[in-house]
């Protein structure tokens, strides 16, 4: 075949922090933008989903939420 006898598997796991509990694409590090032929394109680099509404989560967002809070919190957190 191609000389490969085995593969080592790695898992991509990263915590994403949303300031003050504002959960939306605009605040996510996976939300990236670039200009193509003079047009601004915004997409999720995890799912390659084009993002139109940045104030909520994309339909294909792979993030799951545990309710973990880091720092001081004065209100009850609710899942998006």
Image: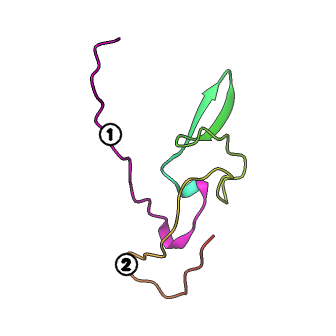
State left or right for residue 77 relative to residue 39: left
Report the front residue among 76 and 1.
1
Where 42 falls versus 29 (above or below)?
Answer: above
Tell me where residue 33 sits by quadrant: top right
Residue 6 belongs to the span the image colors magenta: yes
Report the front residue among 77 and 6.
6
What crowding class fits label 2: few (fewer than 14 Cα within 10 Å), some (14-19), or many (20 or more)?
Answer: few
Q: Nearer the viewer, mark 2 or mark 1?
A: 1
Report the front residue among 57 and 40.
57
Q: Position of residue 9 (x, y in %)?
A: 32, 39
Q: In the rendered view of the protein, which quadrant contains the C terminus?
A: bottom right
Question: In what element is the residue under mark 1?
Answer: loop
Q: Residue at x 38, y 54 (%)?
A: 14
Q: Position of residue 2 (x, y in %)?
A: 33, 12
Q: Residue at x 60, y 54 (%)?
A: 25
Q: Position of residue 60 (x, y in %)?
A: 64, 50
Q: CA distance from mark 2 to mark 1?
A: 34 Å
Residue matched to label 2? 71
Question: In what element is the residue under mark 2?
Answer: loop
Magenta part mainly helix, strand or loop? loop
Residue matched to label 1? 9
Start-end of magenta stretch:
1-25
Where 45 falls versus 71 (above or below)?
Answer: above
């Amino acid at each position: 075949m191609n000389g490969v006898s085995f593969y080592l598997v790695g898992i991509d796991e990263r915590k994403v922090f949303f300031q003050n509990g504002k959960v939306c694409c605009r605040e996510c590090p996976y939300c990236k933008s670039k200009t193509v032929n003079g047009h601004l394109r915004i997409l999720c680099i995890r799912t390659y989903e084009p993002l139109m509404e940045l104030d909520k989560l994309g339909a294909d967002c792979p993030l799951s939420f545990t309710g973990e809070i880091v720092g001081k919190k004065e209100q009850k957190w609710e899942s998006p």
